[in-house]
Image: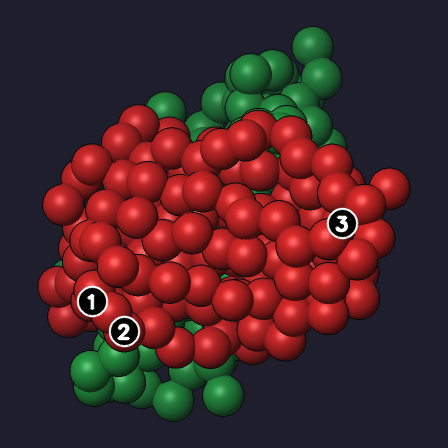
Amino acid sequence: AQSVAQPEDQVNVAEGNPLTVKCTYSVSGNPYLFWYVQYPNRGLQFLLKYITGDNLVKGSYGFEAEFNKSQTSFHLKKPSALVSDSALYFCAVRDSDRGSTLGRLYFGRGTQLTVWP
Amino acid sequence: DGGITQSPKYLFRKEGQNVTLSCEQNLNHDAMYWYRQDPGQGLRLIYYSQIVNDFQKGDIAEGYSVSREKKESFPLTVTSAQKNPTAFYLCASSIFIRGADTQYFGPGTRLTVL
């Protein structure tokens, strides 16, 4: 079964400090991994994805994520947090070896990031 | 949110009523999805569709119905059989490229049962 765990419901960080939002996954084959961000009462915005290749993926708004196959992790990072980064972050996974069916994603429960001034 | 519209933004329903949530996309995407979001539970898949006139149940399809008569439209009906429909509903779409497709989301509809 495919699944995603976001072990922290909430992450608090001071503006200017680095931030990390954790994600671990479980798939039977090779994973495709995604990060999305959601602002209050809005839809999800795509940040970045890992398909193959370089383990460090760069995305929108200065975010990056590191794929670690041995630890089955895909943590989201940013070197210097902004107050405007405060939002709900979702990690998602799908199995690349699932054959046909489409872009069926499995989402974590989300991590609320708060950046305080 | 660009390219995918959902309406209405807020919807109130009395118990026993069916309501239909609209989702339209102008991205020429093949696949469309409906998710339900409840606080602390992440996103749960209700229905998805790869092509016109075809759709599959997701994890929580009971009490919901969909249609896909046009590529750009994927309306969701919340029926009176859905026991706890108050939630935030999100529609998404993606190009059906095996494996590498990215889902893009609409702005959502918040449904409240009175």
Going by the image, does B82 lie left or right of A95?
right
Which tag, 1 or 3, sits closer to the chain's start?
Answer: 1
Viewer can see residue A88:
yes
Measured as percent of width and height from the top left, residue A24 is found at 53, 67
Chain with green colouring: A
In the displayed structure, B6 sits above or below B66; it is above
Q: Chain of mark 2?
A: B
What amino acid type is highlighted by mark number 1? Ile
Measured as percent of width and height from the top left, residue B1 is found at 37, 30
In the displayed structure, A56 sits above or below A99; it is above
Contact, mark 2 vs mark 1 (Cβ under 8 Å): yes
Residue B51 — which label? 1
Which of labels 3 and 2 is toward the front? 2
Q: Which residue is mark 3?
A: B86
Residue at screen point 20% across, 82% down = A100
Indicate the quadrant where residue A17 lies.
top right
Q: Which residue is mark 2?
A: B54
Chain with red colouring: B
Which tag, 3 or 2, sits closer to the chain's start?
Answer: 2
Residue B100 — which label? none
Task: Name the residue nearer the viewer: A32 or A115.
Answer: A32
How far apart are the alpha carbons under marks 1 and 3? 28 Å
Task: Name the residue nearer the viewer: A13 or B81.
Answer: B81
Q: Residue furthest right?
A: B114
Residue at screen point 65% across, 70% down = B63
Is label 2 on the same chain as label 1?
A: yes
